[in-house]
Image: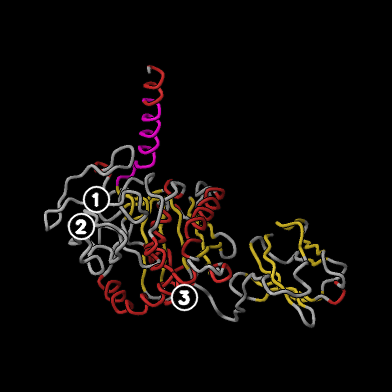
Amino acid sequence: MKLLTKITILISFLITSILTAQNKDEMGCDTSISAESISRLKSLKPALKELEKDFNSKKYSKNSRSSKFIHQIPIKAHVIRSSESAGGLNISDLNDAIKRLNSIYSEALISFYLFENIDFIDNSEYVHFKKGDEEKLTKADYTSGIINIYFVDYIENNSGNSICGYSVNKQNCHMIVMKNECTSNNSSLIHEMGHVFSLIHTHGISNTKITAELVNGSNCDTEGDGICDTPADPGLSSDKIDNFCNYNGNELDSNGDEFSPDTENFMSYSKKACRNHFTPQQLARMYAYFNIEKNEFTQTENGIEIREDNSVTNSLNSVSIYPNPIRDNTIYLKGFDNLSRLYFKVINLQGQLLLSGKALNNRIRINTLSSGSYFLLLETVDSKTVKRFIK
């Protein structure tokens, strides 16, 4: 029994340490939802509902082909360093954050990739960044038509408090500002990306007033976050969550019913280490919003719509490429008897054609491509197949 008690105490200590370490910034997100955004969402509601049905039919269809199409969305990453090129987000942390994003957002049939090279902004003026100064960044360092994320050492909100991040979402401008330290906490960047795709905090629009959403769910479609499978949330904070992610608040709604919020939802103000999921309706909402506003998030000029799909039986299905990721700037092909009449196209994830030609000697040279993910379209007179590769 003594050993069991010691183990229990140790586990409790470790959990407390982890949660404390990941919640040093009491104010995680400082995203403001404008009246314009709310009005826009209300106007889109009928279209969103229809696309949410479409998502559910794809996502939960027994036909596996219908659920495999993942929308590829480019992200432009801006890493802010000192004027002497010192500091800045560790690139391995950035790559890990993108992988974490994709592991979660694949459930919404969405995936992200880094657009072109990382933009390093060497300007000490921005290392300690103040919310509201976004225009200074976007004037010189902004890629239109896609999501821009700026990674900085420190973010100060309008009240002078340190925050983990926030997003700015308006027509022709979708950006996230993230504190470097919070990029690797496994929930803050996911939370901010949720705002980009129209999600509201589970406690609703106001960060200071208790939600009007009722615990019984009768007004869930119009109050709170407007999503009915997220329980009414009175506004979470670290002092309302114990070290095992249990809610210990005692607020009541206007009917006198006690709140029982979801302390593990990404869009809550719960402890960052507790947040680990979106609800099915949140996933459907993000999918729907993306499909309505697709041109706001993807550069489509000269685009070629393409997807990886080997389900159709043809003579190229047996072709494989190796190694993958590619080494020495060369793609090798095997598995097709007559490679001498095989043609190829290399297309980026935006659908832009980068290379084309005839595959010679079972190989394709790609030395002009920068590092990243691509599609390889292989074609003969009567067959074609698409392979995805990484350089």
- Colour convention: secondary structure
Mark 2 — residue?
A: 215
Residue projecting furthest to the top: 2
Type of the residue with mark 2:
Val
Real-space CA distance between mark 1 and mark 3, rounded to the nearest whole angstrom: 35 Å
Type of the residue with mark 3:
Lys
Where, quadrant-wise, is the C terminus in this rendering?
Answer: bottom right
Q: Main secondary structure of the magenta part?
A: helix
Do we see residue 223 in this rendering?
yes
Which region shows up in magenta? 9-26
Q: Position of residue 50 (x, y in %)?
A: 38, 78
Real-space CA distance between mark 2 and mark 1, rounded to the nearest whole angstrom: 8 Å
Q: Position of residue 211 (x, y in %)?
A: 19, 59
Do we see residue 141 in this rendering?
no
Classed neighbour count for the residue bearing mark 2: other residues with Cα under 10 Å, few (<14), some (14–19), many (≥20): many
Helix, strand, or loop for circle 3? helix
Tell which circle, 1 or 3, labels the residue nearer the N-terminal end.
1
Mark 1 — residue?
A: 260
Placement of 98 over or under 136, stated as above or below: above
Q: Which mark is residue 44?
A: none
Helix, strand, or loop for circle 2? loop
Residue projecting furthest to the front: 62
Q: Position of residue 82 (x, y in %)?
A: 48, 50
**Residue at horizontal 43 percent and vertical 63 percent from the top:** 137
Classed neighbour count for the residue bearing mark 3: other residues with Cα under 10 Å, few (<14), some (14–19), many (≥20): some
| Magenta-colored stretch includes residue 12 | yes
Q: Which mark is residue 294?
A: 3
Q: Are marks 2 and 1 in contact (CB under 8 Å)?
A: yes
Tell which circle, 2 or 1, labels the residue nearer the N-terminal end.
2
Q: Is residue 120 left or right of residue 29?
A: right
Camera-nearest residue between 124 and 158: 158
Q: Nearer the viewer, mark 1 or mark 3?
A: 1
